[in-house]
Image (cartoon, rainbow, N blue to C red):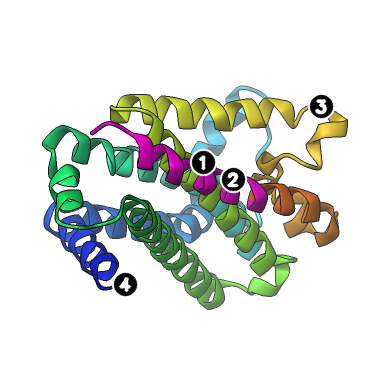
């Protein structure tokens, strides 16, 4: 276990030294502040645009905002944060291939599967940190300005979206083990998510698609029960395990 923890420590230190950790924290803090800020500024912006809209025959009435407005903004913005996360960390394996540092570590006795585990733990912990930070900031501001109880199933909605991010990270690990450059990893991860999204359009497939975990509007409104997401949660969890199960033997056989 000592080589694993040493390698994991190296990964955290490298993430901090390269500035990726700082970028990640700033990004999620920014999104966390933006959600309630956009909701709070919406009435002012609509008032500013009222004259222009009136000239076009559109009547602007009083706009009411609450915590639900902010949480809707949160779930609209978090996909952008996840895309940025993928772009920042898509080279987590491929940079090792190019520099030869991974081969050097392997010659010193580090088992290949431990590199997969360490990098997976790193990405999952960073995703959890960033996502949790963004959620906590939005929750805190919403509690100050409004009442978070207006959003139904809030913590469950946040949890299923977090799981969707975990699935995307497992896809990154899988494609990082198969491919040699970060561009390919990014593209394959994006295409896989898009295919899953398009498959969710099919009614019989939708309940099983991980893409359903992104659709939290009905949950927040209380229009659907949490049971409607159980099958998608089970499939997403199974796919995460499958990605890891494939990644480890691929790395074990990869010519470095």
Where disc 1 sits, the SS reads: helix
Q: Position of residue 61 (x, y in %)?
A: 68, 46
Q: Is residue 85 above or below residue 223?
A: above
N-term-proximal mark, 2 vs 3: 3
The 10 Å Cα crowd at callout 2, few under 14, some 14 to 19, many 20 or more, is: some
Q: Is residue 203 left or right of residue 7?
A: right
The residue that mark 1 highlights is 246
Q: Quadrant of residue 53?
A: top right
Residue name at image x 35 percent, y 56 percent? 30
N-term-proximal mark, 4 vs 3: 4
Q: Using the numbered discs, state the Cα–Cα distance from disc 4 to disc 2 in whole angstroms.
A: 23 Å
The residue that mark 3 highlights is 202
Q: In the rendered image, is residue 132 in sight?
A: yes
Where disc 4 sits, the SS reads: loop
**4 or 2: mark nearer the eye:** 4
The residue that mark 4 highlights is 1
N-term-proximal mark, 1 vs 4: 4
Q: Position of residue 182 (x, y in %)?
A: 30, 31
Tell me which segment is drawn in magenta: 237-256
N-term-proximal mark, 4 vs 2: 4
Q: Using the numbered discs, state the Cα–Cα distance from disc 2 to disc 1 in whole angstroms.
A: 6 Å
**1 or 3: mark nearer the eye:** 1
Q: In the rendered image, is residue 62 in sight?
A: no
Q: Using the numbered discs, state the Cα–Cα distance from disc 2 to disc 3 in whole angstroms.
A: 23 Å
Q: Quadrant where the N terminus lies? A: bottom left
Q: Is residue 28 left or right of residue 19?
A: right
């Amino acid at each position: 276990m000592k080589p694993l923890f040493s390698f994991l420590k190296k990964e955290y230190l490298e993430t901090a030294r390269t500035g990726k950790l700082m970028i990640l924290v700033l990004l999620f803090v920014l999104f966390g502040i933006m959600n309630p800020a956009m909701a709070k500024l919406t009435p002012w912006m609509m008032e500013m645009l009222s004259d222009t809209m009136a000239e076009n025959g559109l009547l602007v009435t009083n706009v009411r905002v609450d915590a639900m407005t902010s949480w809707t903004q949160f779930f609209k913005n978090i996909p952008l944060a996840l895309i940025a996360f993928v772009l920042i960390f898509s080279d987590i394996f491929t940079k090792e291939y190019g520099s030869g540092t991974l081969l050097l570590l392997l010659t010193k006795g580090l088992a290949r599967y431990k590199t997969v585990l360490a990098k997976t733990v790193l990405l999952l912990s960073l995703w959890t940190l960033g996502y949790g930070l963004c959620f906590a900031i939005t929750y805190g501001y919403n509690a100050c300005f409004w009442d978070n109880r207006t959003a139904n199933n809030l913590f469950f909605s946040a949890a299923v979206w977090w799981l969707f991010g975990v699935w995307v990270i497992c896809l990154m690990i899988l494609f990082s083990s198969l491919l040699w450059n970060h561009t390919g990893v990014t593209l394959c991860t994006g295409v896989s998510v898009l295919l899953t999204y398009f498959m969710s359009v099919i009614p019989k497939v939708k309940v099983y698609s991980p893409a359903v975990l992104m659709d939290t509007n009905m949950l927040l409104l209380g229009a659907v029960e949490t049971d409607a997401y159980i099958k998608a949660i089970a499939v997403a969890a199974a796919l995460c395990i499958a990605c890891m199960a494939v990644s480890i033997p691929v790395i074990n056989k990869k010519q470095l």
